[in-house]
Amino acid sequence: MKKDRYRITETQFFTIEGSSRREGGLPLPEQIFDMLAEFSLEKRMPDPRGINSYILDLEGEGKERVLRAGGYVGTIVFKDGTQFEILPMLQAKRKDGTVVSNKRVFLDMVSSLKSVPLNKNTLNTKAAENLNIFETFILAFINEVHGIVKNGIKMAYTPFENNENFLKGKVIYAKHATKNFAHKDKFYVMYDVFTVNRAENRLIKSTLKYLHDVTSSARSRNRIDSLIANFDGVDYSMNYSQDFAASILDRSMAGYFNALRWAEIFLLGRYISVTKGRDVSYGVLFPSRQLFDSYTVSNLLKMLDNQRFKAEIQKKNYPMMNHPMPRDSAQALAVMTYRETGMRVVFDAKWQGLSGDDENFGIRDQDIMDIYDLMNIYHTDSVCYIYPLTREMREESREIAFRNEDGIIGRVCFVDIGDMQGSLSSVLEHIFGEKIKTDDKKADK
């Protein structure tokens, strides 16, 4: 029986069926609503000020309760198969005018994370658009393993111990003495055998088994069954950490790189936070601002001319489920220096939709106050905040700038999610007064 799948964007919320309808709300059966609310309240995301935020914010009482998207995007799947997706707030348009769906924006942003080994062959498929993000990760791993099988599973010489009727290799005297006290015709020996049962293959087979039990896609499960059959003679890993430590990733194992990175994600929970709950099979969620930061930096580095600009990318902290976030000062995304003039500017990305109808266009007071902190921390003369271009701001012609007695200390610039390269080029030209040419070949890498 196919279970329900519910999808909202960051600007929307869930309601309870039968309650008074609110514009933008998606109704859920009350039992499902309660389970989702319980899971959300369990997963606290403390920020540096010690204030808890949640995947979904619970508002109201009784039947009039709502669960509002709280700045996190991704997938939650219940044990009964019910799925929830929270997608970015923006659609986008390409240069040719074609509309980019919220899901495509999400996939593009996730693929910019260095910790996620997604490739274009996986992303540019109809399946990636239709599957939830975790199932897309499973699909990516399956495709990587398919490539390994197609090119031939790697074998290696590995130590093998056994009590043999012949002398070969090295006698393990301690074990030989105890095991063969009454068997003078045997030898307990260690020697190398050329086998597929190496650490890397054990980890891949174990990951396939884990994903077979987790995936809700019948097609993925069938492909996993087919792939496991190719690993006959390979044991399941008995110690993941030990096998990862024993893995050899040289040029001869290049085809294994991404598959083993996925194995670390699935088996050890590294790089990506995959969480569970009493009624939840898994949840994979990302802070929206982390994705926008990563997407902005990724595109910036692809197009930047290092001979003219020096880019210092800053390491930022993001909230993780049930983990305290370090207290620190205001954080920036990057510091850019124009080598010819020495002009130095702090850049930070803000995943927030602005509107000309709001006071200060909706820019948060804290962000305005942070301008002075950022200038002092990074020893620069100005700050540039980069916001996503919304429909409300597309026709806005007023320049948004912050001034003191010395002049402009902060600017607000916008990037079109559908044309990040062109948008960032315009931002840099506006700030530094220097034309930036995008390198399409470099951007496609």
Image (spheres, helix red, strand yellow):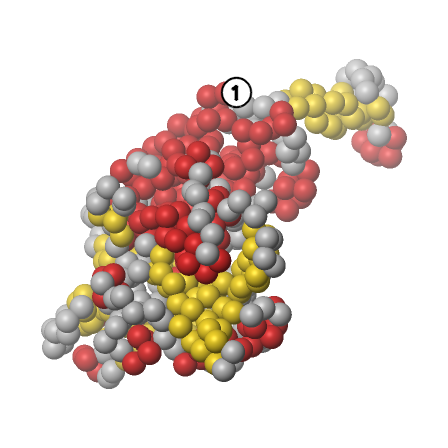
Residue 269 place in picture, x, y as percent:
52, 53
Identify the residue shown where x is 56% and y is 55%: 338
Identify the residue shown where x is 60% and y is 75%: 376
Residue 241 place in picture, x, y as percent:
64, 46
Q: Is residue 273 left or right of residue 82?
A: right
* 297 relative to 197, above or below: below
The residue lying toward the viewer, choosing from 331 and 116, is 331
Residue 55 place in picture, x, y as percent:
37, 68
Tally of numbered discs:
1
Residue 346 visible in the shown view: yes
The residue lying toward the viewer, choosing from 418 and 180, is 418
Q: Is residue 73 left or right of residue 258?
A: left
| Type of amino acid under label 1 | Gly
The residue lying toward the viewer, choosing from 185 and 365, is 365
* 389 relative to 247, above or below: below
Residue indicated by mark 1: 152
Q: Residues within 10 Å of mark 1 (few under 14, many from 20)?
A: few
Residue 221 place in picture, x, y as percent:
35, 37
